Image (tube, rainbow, N blue to C red):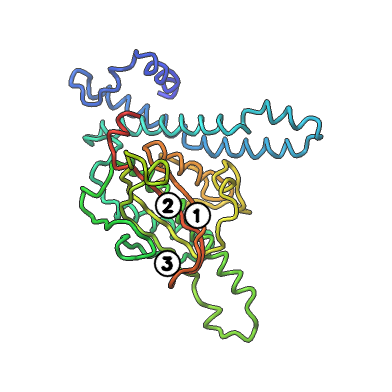
Amino acid sequence: LHENTYLLPHQIIDGDGRGLLLANDNNFPKHNQKYISDVFDQIMSRHGTSVETLADAVIHARNMEHQLPGIFKRNFRNEAELLKTNSIESFLHSRLLIQLLSDHYISLNKGKPNGAVSLDADVLDVVDDAVTEAKHVCDANLGVAPEVHIIRHKDDDDVGGDDFTRSSNDSPPIIRSWLHHAIVEVTKNAMTSNVERWMRSCSSSTMQQSSSSLESLPPNVVIGVGRDTMTSGGDGTDSNPKDLLSIRIMDQGIGLKDEKRAFGFAQTASRERWDRLEEQQSYAAVRQPLGSLGVGLPLSKLMMRVFGGDLVLSNRERRGDMDSGCTATLKINYDDTYQAKN
């Protein structure tokens, strides 16, 4: 079975394996469908640590570059494919789609009519699940997890946008595991930023402060869910504006220092690698470290862009009850014709 995982992708690419992809083909015996499904499952498992491996290799290559004499650094950077943004993005894009195709076949084989694609997902339920996971991970690694308040856009003037309901009409086509993954990553970062600012505040407190102020919890993270319209030009003149699901994760932390670095692969300010929880399931298809390697944000951004959305970061000034901090916005396209064409 393991050896065939090397042959199968080539058969599919060459067109020789098209019949193998028909999970509901009555002419294809059930036991063979199960066999192929198991092979795809093994492909996903083999790809499970590829991002982590690549990130470690990129970090190692950068360390090598820093140790080289200046005269050799230019040639090293020009020839080291690991340090080229286009090469990294191509690898990540390829890996994501391999995982998606494998997950799609496995889901079809299990009788899910739309495979890995969810057409009527309860987005607020996805947010709830992701927040719960992010809180567990932060509590396990930081010893504390800020509270998270989930609101609809209409419920908060600072968030803006249109009202969002749990109706299936308000849900765009999504890859649930990808959206879950992106929300976990961004929420985890928001919590970490809040905790860091809170700890700085505590450490700068004087001994005269009351014990109640020292024992206070980190500030809350606020997540707003709603529908937005985005124009490609940003000036409102686009004749084909995008109808988007918008998920805003607003922290009250230390703020964004460098957006380019934030989305740089294997760029991180974290000093130690976070551990996964044993029961954590969402990373089965998109497994990667939860801290220290700098892969969460760039991969989450790519996931959103595959289907016409995006992930953007921006600093926010204090307003009302919300202190200053960073707002991360996940955008997902409602237009399924865009996805069909791409």
Dots 2, 1 in contact, CB < 8 A: yes
Question: Which residue is denoted by mark 2 in the rendering?
Answer: 329
Numbered circle sitting on residue 264: none
Q: Residue 124's quadrant in the figure?
A: bottom left
- Rendered view: 111 above or below 263: above
* Label 1 element class: strand
- Precedes in sequence: disc 2 or disc 1: 1
- Rendered view: 42 above or below 176: above
Q: Position of residue 252 (x, y in %)?
A: 50, 65
Residue 128 visible in the current orientation: no
Question: Which residue is denoted by mark 3 in the rendering?
Answer: 147
* Label 3 element class: loop
Pick whichever, 167 or 7, lies toward us: 167
Q: What amino acid type is highlighted by mark number 3?
A: Glu
Q: Position of residue 60 (x, y in %)?
A: 67, 38
Q: In the displayed structure, does residue 293 sit left or right of residue 236?
A: right
Closer to viewer: mark 3 or mark 2 = 2
Dots 3, 2 in contact, CB < 8 A: no
Q: Position of residue 98 (x, y in %)?
A: 41, 29
Q: What amino acid type is highlighted by mark number 2?
A: Thr
> Are there few (<14), some (14-19), or many (20+) residues within 10 Å of tag 3?
some
> Going by the picture, which residue comes out furthest to the front?
237
- Precedes in sequence: disc 3 or disc 1: 3
In three-dimensional space, the C-alpha distance between marks 3 and 2, rounded to whole angstroms, equals: 19 Å
Dots 3, 1 in contact, CB < 8 A: no
Pick whichever, 338 or 233, lies toward us: 233
Question: Which residue is denoted by mark 1 in the rendering?
Answer: 314
Q: Residue 36's quadrant in the figure?
A: top left
